[in-house]
Image (cartoon, helix red, strand yellow):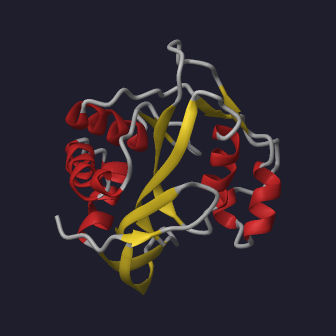
Amino acid sequence: MIVHIRPIFGNWDAGFALDKHIISSEFLGNNEAGYPQFNTTRTEVGESVYQLKYRQDWSQAVRLADQISRSILPLVDKVGLIVPMPPSVTRSRQPVTEVSLALGRIAEIPVFEGVLTKTASPAGATQLKNMNNKADKLTVLEGRFVIEDEIKNSGSWNVLLIDDLFDTGASMEAACSALRTYSKLKHIYVVALTWK
């Protein structure tokens, strides 16, 4: 898989994204049902994420996890646990969780799916994807990430937080603010599969 690693900055100790998501997107017009149609060219990573999220090609989770193992894990200190970013959309299988679990198997690192959870949006609230301002997003996200004490061992570990798309970084920063309150975590590293 071809990648173009980019550092991403925020309230974490180190962060990286594998590649840009979309190279180009040309509006083709609306289809017969009135929905807009696009001719979209994605990077290899972007296409893999698209196939995973929207075509349920679960084999892509392993490809993406393998790439994180080879390209990102060598850039950070020893990771003691992996945490998937809580989803914004409810699905029977969560793409980011699948990537996290695959990485856990490849790198032999435990995955804690329930350490970080996100409470539901208030009724009628604007969806984050429809907001462009980072400050507004942070306001909407305040207090929505919750820590569950799932780690039963004593000590503290470096954590790798995995998300699919990095845009303003608001969700990742809100999640990391919550993770900072958990005494069993030391350094927080983040990886986004793609950036917008």
Along the line of sight, the residue nearer the viewer: 195 or 50: 195
Residue 151 to residue 49: above or below: above
Q: Residue furthest top?
A: 152
Which of the 4 image quarters holds residue 43? bottom left
- 116 sits left or right of 31 in the view: right
Along the line of sight, the residue nearer the viewer: 34 or 18: 18
Which of the 4 image quarters holds residue 16? bottom left
Residue 1 to residue 96: above or below: below
Location of residue 138 in the rendering, given as x and y in whole percent from the top left corner? 76, 58
Q: Residue at x 65, y 29 (%)?
A: 183
- 11 sits left or right of 21 in the view: right
| Quadrant of the image containing the N terminus | bottom left
- 188 sits left or right of 20 in the view: right
Q: Residue at x 66, y 31 (%)?
A: 182
Location of residue 54 in the rendering, given as x and y in whole percent from the top left corner? 37, 52
Q: Residue at x 19, y 70 (%)?
A: 2
Q: Residue at x 26, y 52 (%)?
A: 64
Along the line of sight, the residue nearer the viewer: 131 or 123: 131
Location of residue 91 in the rendering, given as x and y in whole percent from the top left corner? 48, 36
Location of residue 133 in the rendering, given as x and y in whole percent from the top left corner? 74, 72
Which of the 4 image quarters holds residue 150? top right
User: How many numbered dots are placed on residues in this image?
Assistant: 0
- 7 sits left or right of 1 in the view: right
Q: Residue furthest left?
A: 1
